[in-house]
Amino acid sequence: MQQSKPAEELYDLDADPHEVNNLIGNPKYTKVLDRLRQAHLQWVVETRDIGLIPESEIQIREGKVGARYNILNNAAPNLIEQIRNTANLAVDNRSNLDDLKDATGHTDSIVRYWALVGLGNRPTEVADCKDLFVKALADPSPCVRIAASRALLKIKEPQQALTTLSNELTGEHEWARLRAAIVLDESGEAARPLIPELKRCLTDQPNKYITRVANRTLNVLLETNNVVK
């Protein structure tokens, strides 16, 4: 029911079984949050889980290694830990911004993606990062380009971000198209210049989610109630 999904969620299921009161940010639960984060992230390393990899990157790497299982199966443990640690930094508003900035230069695109997501999550603190975000728009990985576009929109620098997102909406990777649509949806009025591009997303898409997200964005911007299947 909210405009956007929180970066993290923590609920007391005994007192709040319907998960209405998000306890993230409540200092009373800091130790609980840290313990659960560590348990989850340790599981990610042990199982070589690919849940921290953006869908577009999964699609690209699956094509190279033959199966999703193989994406991290033979990866060096330190890479998996770096992905895990950077994802953790990205959702923790207490983390060191310099660590996230350094991670934008990592050799692996998944790490770069999470670094940019983390910086974009803290727009009031990263106004000086515009050049870093613009540079990332030329990244070879679509998920990194989209994360950089999101960060630029967050700091009210839409021009180059919208150009990149427009290109991603018609790119070859369907999950990158979806992610670009999601970023525009969460951007509100900033997405208005791309209304024509969003309208073109209502037909001939490789998956239904692209159409549904684009339609929702258009309904909000145009105050309509169009329904798509």
Image: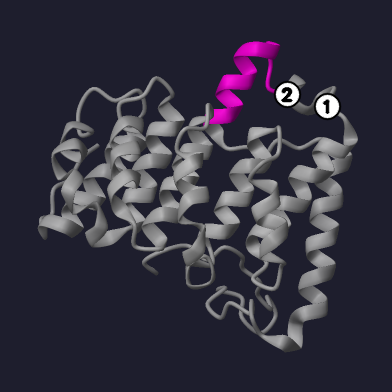
The kind of residue on which mark 1 rests is Ala
Q: Main secondary structure of the magenta part?
A: helix
Residue 225 x %, y %? 13, 54
Looking at the figure, which quarter contains the C terminus?
A: top left
Residue 174 x %, y %? 41, 26
- How crowded is the residue under tag 2: few (<14 C-alpha within 10 Å), some, or many (20+)? many
What's the distance in space between the residues labelled 2 and 1, CA to CA?
7 Å
Q: Is residue 194 left or right of residue 41?
A: left
Q: Which residues are magenta?
A: 56-68
Contact between labelled residues 1 and 2, with CB atoms less than 8 Å apart: yes
Residue 114 x %, y %? 62, 48
- Residue 111, above or below 93: above
Residue 194 figure quarter: top left
Residue shown at 80% from the left, 76% from the top? 32
Q: Say which element carries label 2.
A: helix
- How crowded is the residue under tag 1: few (<14 C-alpha within 10 Å), some, or many (20+)? few
**Is 206 within the magenta?**
no
From the viewer's side, name the closer residue of 205 and 53. 53
Residue 75 figure quarter: top right
Residue shown at 37% from the left, 56% from the top? 153
Q: Is residue 140 left or right of residue 84?
A: left
Q: Which residue is mark 2?
A: 71
The kind of residue on which mark 2 rests is Ile
Q: Which residue is mark 1?
A: 75
Residue 213 figure quarter: top left
Looking at the figure, which quarter contains the N terminus?
A: bottom left
Residue 141 visible from this viewpoint: yes
**Is 62 within the magenta?**
yes
